[in-house]
Image (cartoon, grey):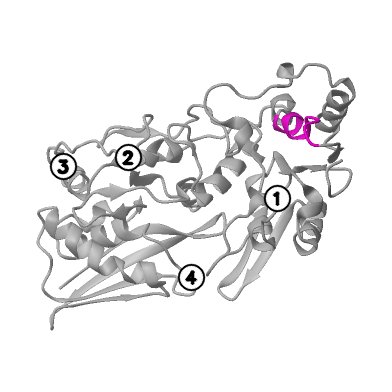
Amino acid sequence: MGFARACSVALVGVEGVVVEVQADLEAGVAAFTLVGLPDKSLVESRDRVRAAVVNSGAQWPQKKLTVGLSPASVPKGGSGFDLAVACAVLGAAERIDPASIADVVMIGELGLDGRVRPVRGVLPAVLAAAEAGYRQVVVPEQTAGEAALVPGVSVLGVRSLRQLIAVLCDEPVPEEQEPHDQGRPDTMLAGLMVPGAGMGTGIARGSAQGGGHRPDLADVAGQARPRKALEVAAAGGHHLLLSGPPGAGKTMLAERLPAILPPLTRQESLEVTAVHSVAGILPPGEPLVSRAPYCAPHHSATMQSLVGGGNGLPRPGAVSLAHRGILFLDEAPEFSVRALDALRQPLESGHVVVARSAGVVRLPARFLMVLAANPCPCGR
């Protein structure tokens, strides 16, 4: 019989709650019970964790096993609890020292072969852990750079459960093949602890900010009046309407507006990066968004895709992905009236509150809106 605990983080929107993962072993028929308000994907972690532990060379305890997620009142979902569950079970089975994991926050999904895979929302999760007083975090190697953006936190990036067990037991760290899926070149070597610090720069999702050359207002020839309008809008934070026939350059000008916006401050960068991390759209190798994001949804977008929604707890919509940047609505009159009306509240308050049966989520949504429209439906 044994007991051990580790910590992980449950995300509610872009805010995190530290969750204590407790594992208890008792004599009895071998069984694995998971309690604490888990969703379907988290319940499935029982099979993932068991296979990962066995394939990592550790023995699975043949006893009655109960894993509790506390506080039980907070909804928990996703596969990011796998690593904490596995370590809590190994601690209860005395395969690793329970004291070595009691105050460590662990975030990551386990593959059946024991590999640690990246998950969404690492930055807001580590921010929540730091605010709660935790100073050691274990994350997948691919997201270690993202976690290291939080000051005052030591981050350990691992490729597999086998490596983590070796680090915790002070044993030689085995070599693991470098992951090819969703790999990030700025990650740390397994077993290396570094203090959190600012790392690199990044750009956000949007056709105007892909890799290579970024569209700039210097590319535009002529267009003196529209250029002046863009400069005034950028300087004063004014929303903008571009009206003209097809081919007049409305989209071209809107795509170049982020280039004349000032760089994001450190706090703004963390806000934007947290939203993009939860949405799973951070570019590989660029853990920090330092330029104003640009989001241009299609005119067939629904209200939920604009303001946020989805099954269970709502996910960020276009207004949140454009936080501290540009929301461009091309062919604005073609958007549904319901979708356009839903933009009023975030435009006024700078945030959006989405209520669903699974809970209420408050998401940041302070953006500069640019509309483009033809003079009439025929485009002429």
Point out residue 339 in the picture as x, y percentages from the top left corner: 75, 60
To which residue does mark 4 refer? Answer: 75
Which segment did they paint magenta? 246-255
Determine crowd level at label 1: few under 14, some 14-19, many 20+ residues with C-alpha closer than 10 A.
Answer: many
Looking at the image, the residue that sits furthest to the bottom is 28
Which residue is painted at 67% across and 43% down in the image? Answer: 296
Residue 141, label in figure: 2
Point out residue 201 in the picture as x, y percentages from the top left corner: 53, 27
The answer for how far apart the CA atoms under marks 3 and 1 are is 46 Å
Residue 365, label in figure: 1
Determine crowd level at label 3: few under 14, some 14-19, many 20+ residues with C-alpha closer than 10 A.
Answer: few
Query: Would residue 114 appear left or right of 344 to someone viewing this image?
Result: left
The answer for how far apart the CA atoms under marks 3 and 4 are is 35 Å
Q: Is residue 250 magenta?
A: yes
To which residue does mark 3 refer? Answer: 170
Q: Amino acid at mark 1?
A: Ala
Helix, strand or loop status at disc 2: helix
